Amino acid sequence: MGRKKSHIVNLVNINAIDDLTKFLTETIHDLEYVQPDIMIFKENSYFNNKTKTAGFPDLTVKIWSDGNKLAYRKELHNLYMTSPVNEVLCLNQEDTIIERWYKQKRLPNLDFRELIRTQDDIEFDLRDLAE
């Protein structure tokens, strides 16, 4: 994630970087970052930096706790929606409903008492957690 002086926050588009070596060895350390609970990249050859990863994830899973204020949730949601390929699954700790977004479009909720299948056919079986 990057933050410019205007405080506009976006995920980093690694395809738009001219000097990738400089970006991975220098620039990436100056960026702010977020740590979703799960991020899945189908293809990302930029994992050689051990502390931060740049690029658009294909799947982001965020588990909200009661302490996550609405403004924080909105900020992260808006950040995740800057990715043109990201599917976002949001769960509340005290609920079984999964809010789902794909390519900036709201999709029907899922329930983790059932087998979860993403738009790109990634499967999660969380049914044991619902008991």
Image (cartoon, rainbow, N blue to C red):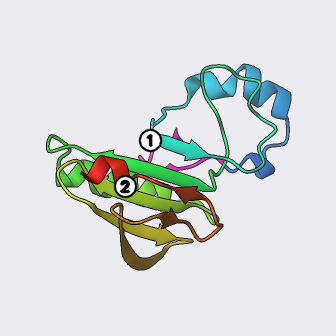
Residue 11 among magenta residues = yes
Q: Which residue is under mark 2? A: 127
What amino acid type is highlighted by mark number 2?
Answer: Arg
Which portion, as a residue range, is magenta? 2-12
Q: Residue at 74% of width from left, 46% of height from top?
A: 14
Res. 71 mark:
none
Residue 74: give x, y in percent of width and height.
30, 58
* Residue 21 drawn above or below residue 83: above
Residue plotted at (66% across, 39% down): 54
Decide which of 68, 110 is in the foreground and name it.
110
Give the secondary structure at mark 2.
helix
Within 10 Å of disc 1 (Cα), the crowding (few <14, some 14-19, many 20+) is few
Q: Which residue is pictured at 35% across the width and 49% down the height?
A: 128
Give the mark, 1 or 2, whose residue is nearer the N terminus: 1
The amino acid sitting under disc 1 is: Pro
Q: Check if residue 102 falls in the magenta segment.
A: no
From the viewer's perspective, is the residue at label 1 or at label 2 nearer?
A: 2
Displayed quadrant of residue 53: top right
In the depicted structure, whether residue 56 falls above or below residue 99: above
The picture places residue 84, in percent across and down from the top left corner, at 63, 66
Residue 127 picture location, percent across and down: 37, 55
Q: Mark 1 sits on what residue?
A: 36
Which SS does the magenta portion mostly show? loop
Q: Residue at x 35, y 67 (%)?
A: 99
- Judging from the image, what secondary structure is the residue with disc 1 in? loop
How far separated are the C-alphas under marks 1 and 2? 21 Å
The relative height of residue 128 versus residue 122 in the rendered view (above or below) is above
Which one is nearer the viewer's eye here, 45 or 95?
Answer: 95
Q: Position of residue 51 (x, y in %)?
A: 60, 20
